[in-house]
Amino acid sequence: MAKTFLKIAAIYFTVGVLLGMTMGIMQDFRLASVHAHFNLLGWVSMALFGVIYHFYPKAADTSLAKTHFWLHNIGLPVMQIGLAIEIVSGNSVLLPVVIVSSLLVVVGVVLFTINLFLQLGSASVKQKKDISV
């Protein structure tokens, strides 16, 4: 799971950076919140999940981790696409979609937290070998 989280994080980072560059070129910053969410919930959070799961592999091997992964990666893009359409069109018809997809992300984060609390005491941190010369 750790590598999968990190790979997806890199994709979100690319999307966030490209969106930021596009907004800068066009001098239209209406999608700044979408850009920020892709970078924070996509890049930063997913990368942190991946690093944490790397150091706590028992936590990564749980059904909570897998459910968290899918909830986050279904909820985040749907939420951001819906939000972007709302911002650009000025129409709030997709508000229920944005709300439900936001809740998917929230539930995923809660599952991550529960998973860590359940696994942290029993998971061992990978030890780095000390090579002294």
Image (tube, helix red, strand yellow):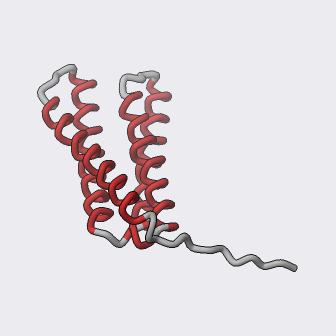
Residue in the picture at 33% in, 49% down: 109
Q: Is residue 15 above or below residue 117?
A: above
Residue in the picture at 24% in, 51% down: 74
Q: Is residue 120 above or below residue 38?
A: below
Residue in the picture at 25% in, 61% down: 67
**Residue 119 lies in quadrant:** bottom left
Residue 95 % position (x, y): 16, 29
Q: Is residue 46 above or below residue 64?
A: above
Residue 112 % position (x, y): 35, 55
123 and 29: which one is in front? 123
Q: Is residue 78 left or right of residue 131?
A: left
Classify the position of the C terminus by image quarter: bottom right
Q: Residue furthest top?
A: 90
51 and 116: which one is in front? 116
Q: Is residue 102 above or below residue 14?
A: above
Residue 17 % position (x, y): 48, 41
